[in-house]
Amino acid sequence: MAFSFPTIKEFLKILSIDHTYCLQHIEQINGKYYYRPSTTEKYNCAVIYEDDSFTALIDAFSNEIVVIIMNENKEPICCITAQQIIPFLVKSYNELHSFYNTVIQTTDSSVTVIDDKERVCTWTDGAEKIFSVKHNEIIGQPITRFFDYKDLEILQSLHDGKSIIAQFHQPRPDLFVLINSNPVYCNGEIIGAVVSETDVTNQVALNEKLFNMSHEMHRLEQEVAKYKDESDPFLAMNGKSPVIQRTIQLARKVCSVKSTVLILGESGVGKEVFAKAIHEASEAAKAPFISINCGAIPEALFESELFGYERGAFSGANSKGKKGKIELAQGGTLFLDEIGEMPLDMQVKLLRVLQERKYYRVGGEKEIHIDFRIIAATNRDLQEEMRKGTFREDLYYRLNVVSLHIPPLRERREDIIELTYSFLNDFSINYNRPIRDLPSSIMHELLHYNWPGNIRELRNVIERLVVFATDGIIKQEYLPFHTTETLDNHTAHSLLLSNNHTILSLQEEMDEHEKKVIERALRILNGNKLECAKQLGVTRATLYNRLKKLGLQ
């Protein structure tokens, strides 16, 4: 949040004082200015210029009680005393206070502010509603008088400077909230903390009820499917987080053209799901969607798989010949998954096909023209692969007409609840096993786990929970991980001493080093992010993601 102040020129008009009268009390001795309101009083004056900022005026009053304002010719045009500016500052403070109160009361969430002594400074109507504690009871009181210390994420922000984003929490049996908490800094010091809690109790309760009626829901889904609009496959994608919605909106834009698309993202984020959605939303939706995993085909068979072969092309070949993936994709979409693992010699041949729009089968003499769209995907850093010489630069630029970066699940944790209940519904129907309840302790684990395998791993975990829940009850021991143990083990084995003798985790140490490297590169390149990405050997999307994660934007 930022607030604007008037310029000094505007401020002088607002102040409405007799400048001529004020200047009569100014005298200059040996280059210094003094203010004499009477024969017995004499005050030193600070000097600023009318083009200076209002902040400069405030800073000047921190040293003297009178400030002289000069024009561009270094001539005094006005003097202001502390007594004259106080009413304006009081009025500005009251206005800012009114804006502040209105902003925090406008949100539906609970907002709490504490000072450095853990005393509550702000307690909104939303907080009263969620926690049933009256404003007049808690204001000015230590927050620990009303809540257990271990349940107060805001204290982590206050004492450790920790920011908490979209953390699932159950403060009492009948209440579920998502927490965002941040420290308040002033001049580099933490002076307090702010926490907001969004009540998601109804969302959790509704989802639980839905899964208690999974069989009925399945019947209704079959009925609804008859009328479902299939023209937009993106509607079936789960996730309302801003980061995934931005990716979906970008994907929609490429559906109406045949541009080559390069999808980037970690394993399990759903790259093929996006590729299929782009195909199904295009004009070629009824045409074939042919997928080939470049990392799963032996190098010796790659050419025949991609281009096909004529009969007798090699020993053991089909006597009738065989169409390749390219030929099967005619008129539709060829999805090259894990393109970063394609052999170098095949990269050359694929590039030639893309350039000339024609090819020959292995052992064939008939020229075949192509008419299809290519969508490629990889979890590798192709910039790094190019540096190592394992991926061709010319092919990279041919494929990278439009790039989509699919965010990992840990960067869109707010979608975990929706994805979890969606998978629960699917598997409870598939296995004919209605799930009575999903305990909050398990949801807590799901929200705090790091998900290295992303959505694919989440889906497998939910399937495991349903398989083990033979009585319809999901239990803690069914989880294949426990976030607390994982965190403890990680901390125990990855501690480093920083220069100031404080203990940092390995990840924090690496993040700090990476932050310094990026800051230095941006400083040398005058903030040119595109050139910075090239120099650092990463994609622009990767750089922007790292800037965001490291708080450098």
Image (tube, rainbow, N blue to C red):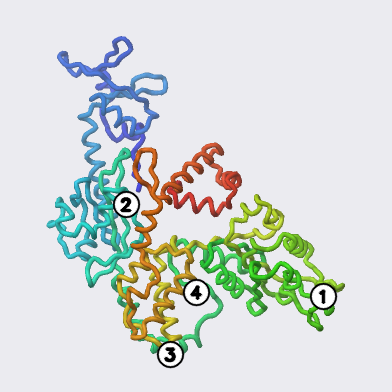
Residue highlighted by disc 3: 219
Element at label 3: helix
| Crowd around label 4: few <14 · some 14–19 · many ≥20 (10 Å) | few
Residue highlighted by disc 1: 314
Q: Nearer the viewer, mark 1 or mark 4?
A: 1
Element at label 4: helix
Residue highlighted by disc 4: 235
Residue 502, x across and y down, in percent: 34, 43
| Crowd around label 2: few <14 · some 14–19 · many ≥20 (10 Å) | many
Contact flag, marks 1 and 4 (Cβ < 8 Å): no
Distance (Cα) linking label 3 and label 1: 53 Å
The mark that comes first in sequence, 1 or 2, is 2
Residue highlighted by disc 2: 182
- Residue 358, relative to residue 528: is it above or below? below
Distance (Cα) linking label 4 and label 3: 20 Å
- Residue for point 56% across, 77% down: 231
Element at label 2: strand
Distance (Cα) linking label 4 and label 2: 34 Å
Which amino acid, by three-letter code, is at mark 1? Phe
